[in-house]
Image (spheres, grey):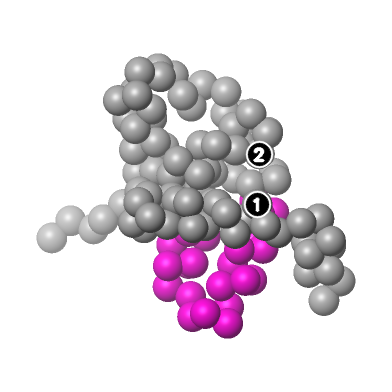
């Protein structure tokens, strides 16, 4: 039985295909090397979020927020678009709203702990 590929390998093509169905070609073209690596890490964090117990989800969300901040603002929407590849479609809005709710103070507080 062949081993499944990790989401960091399958996610970029899935995201690209999603945008192509919407008429957007070359959606991943703006990704720099750093952006691509942050996107890969984000997809793994989405998987972790799906497996995390409730008390630890905030820590995963903080990790996601920092990872998305490592991307150019113009490419961050690609991370959001990849969430349904890992979890359900409903998680896209759920997770992204939680990430947007984390303000700079919460992120700074997490660094001090």
What residue do we see at 49% from left, 58% from top?
Answer: 94
Q: In which quarter of the image is residue 13?
A: top left
Residue neighbourhood size for the residue with mark 2, other residues' Cα within 10 Å, grouped as few (<14), some (14–19), many (≥20): many
Marks 1/2 in contact by CB < 8 Å: the verdict is no
Asked whether the viewer can see residue 13, the reply is no
Give the distance between the C-alpha atoms of the residues marked 1 and 2, in whole angstroms.
15 Å
What residue do we see at 35% from left, 51% from top?
Answer: 89
Residue nearer the viewer, 50 or 8: 50
What residue do we see at 34% from left, 32% from top?
Answer: 18
In the displayed structure, would residue 50 be above or below residue 81? Answer: below
Q: Which of disc 2 and disc 1 is earlier in sequence? A: 2
The boundaries of the magenta stretch are 44-67
Question: Depth-wise, is mark 1 or mark 2 nearer the camera?
Answer: 1
- Label ID, residue 73: none
Mark 1 lies on residue: 100
Of the 4 image quadrants, the one containing the N terminus is bottom left
Q: Does the magenta stretch include residue 31?
A: no
Residue neighbourhood size for the residue with mark 1, other residues' Cα within 10 Å, grouped as few (<14), some (14–19), many (≥20): few
Q: What element carries label 1?
A: helix
Mark 2 lies on residue: 71
Where residue 95 sits in the image (x, y, percent)?
52, 57
What residue do we see at 49% from left, 80% from top?
Answer: 53
Where residue 74 sits in the image (x, y, percent)?
64, 29
Where residue 6 sits in the image (x, y, percent)?
37, 54
In the displayed structure, would residue 113 be above or below residue 74? Answer: below
């Amino acid at each position: 039985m062949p081993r499944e590929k990790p989401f960091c390998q399958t996610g970029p093509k899935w995201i690209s295909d999603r945008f192509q169905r919407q008429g957007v070609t070359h959606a991943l073209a703006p990704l720099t090397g750093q952006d691509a690596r942050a996107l890969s890490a984000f997809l793994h964090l989405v998987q972790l979020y799906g497996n995390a117990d409730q008390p630890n989800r905030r820590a995963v969300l903080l990790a996601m927020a920092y990872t998305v901040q490592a991307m150019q603002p113009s490419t961050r929407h690609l991370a959001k678009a990849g969430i349904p590849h890992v979890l359900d479609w409903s998680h896209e809005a759920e997770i992204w709203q939680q990430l947007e709710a984390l303000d700079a103070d919460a992120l700074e507080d997490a660094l001090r702990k």
